[in-house]
Amino acid sequence: MIMSKESIIFVGLFTVILSAVILMLSYTSSGQELNQYVKIEVQQGDTLWSIADQVADTKKINKNDFIEWVADKNQLQTSDIQPGDELVIPLKKKHQDAYELATVR
């Protein structure tokens, strides 16, 4: 069975539109997910390890898992962070002043 030119165009256009909608929904949901977490501003002398030390000690989280999570969610290419950088860390906002540890893995 040979498809007409109009049918091929319709299927192609439908595929492109469906792909765009799926891409937009996945992008939007990942952004909303990160809004649930605490955002910090990197201070002079901070490293991923020093931030991991602060969180890991109080929340009993593996430091390597913490650093991997932060690097992944913040799309860090290297472990270098600079004062003024904003990082999302795996502490979920429960309400304005209370936080709970997020699932890291």
Image (spheres, rainbow, N blue to C red):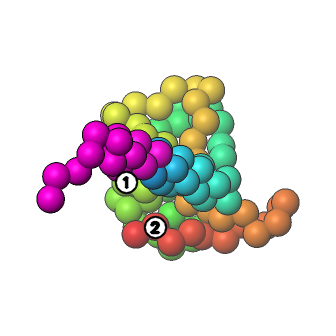
In the image, which residues are magenta?
1-17
The reply to whether the magenta stretch includes residue 7 is yes
Residue position marked by numbered label 2 in the rendering: 104
- In front of the other: 43 or 89: 89
Q: Residue at x 72, y 63 (%)?
A: 93
Residue 6 shows up from this direction: yes
Task: Provide the secondary structure element on which disc 1 rests.
Answer: helix
Residue 36: quarter of image: bottom right
Type of amino acid at the residue the image marks with label 1: Glu
Q: Residue at x 47, y 38 (%)?
A: 47
For residue 14, side relative to residue 92 (left or right):
left
Is mark 2 in CB contact (under 8 Å) with mark 1? Answer: yes
Task: Provide the secondary structure element on which disc 2 rests.
Answer: loop
Q: Position of residue 61 (x, y in %)?
A: 47, 69
**Image quadrant containing the N terminus:** bottom left
Q: Which residue is the extreme one toward the left? A: 1
Q: Position of residue 55 (x, y in %)?
A: 56, 60
Residue 77: quarter of image: top left
Say few, some or many: other residues with alpha carbon within 10 Å of mark 2 (under 14 / 14 to 19 / 20 or more). some
Q: Position of residue 83 (x, y in %)?
A: 58, 26
- In front of the other: 99 or 6: 6
Q: Residue at x 40, y 69 (%)?
A: 105
Q: State which tag comes first along the sequence, 2 or 1.
A: 1
Type of amino acid at the residue the image marks with label 2: Val
For residue 65, side relative to residue 30 (left or right):
left
Residue 100: quarter of image: bottom right
Residue position marked by numbered label 1 in the rendering: 68
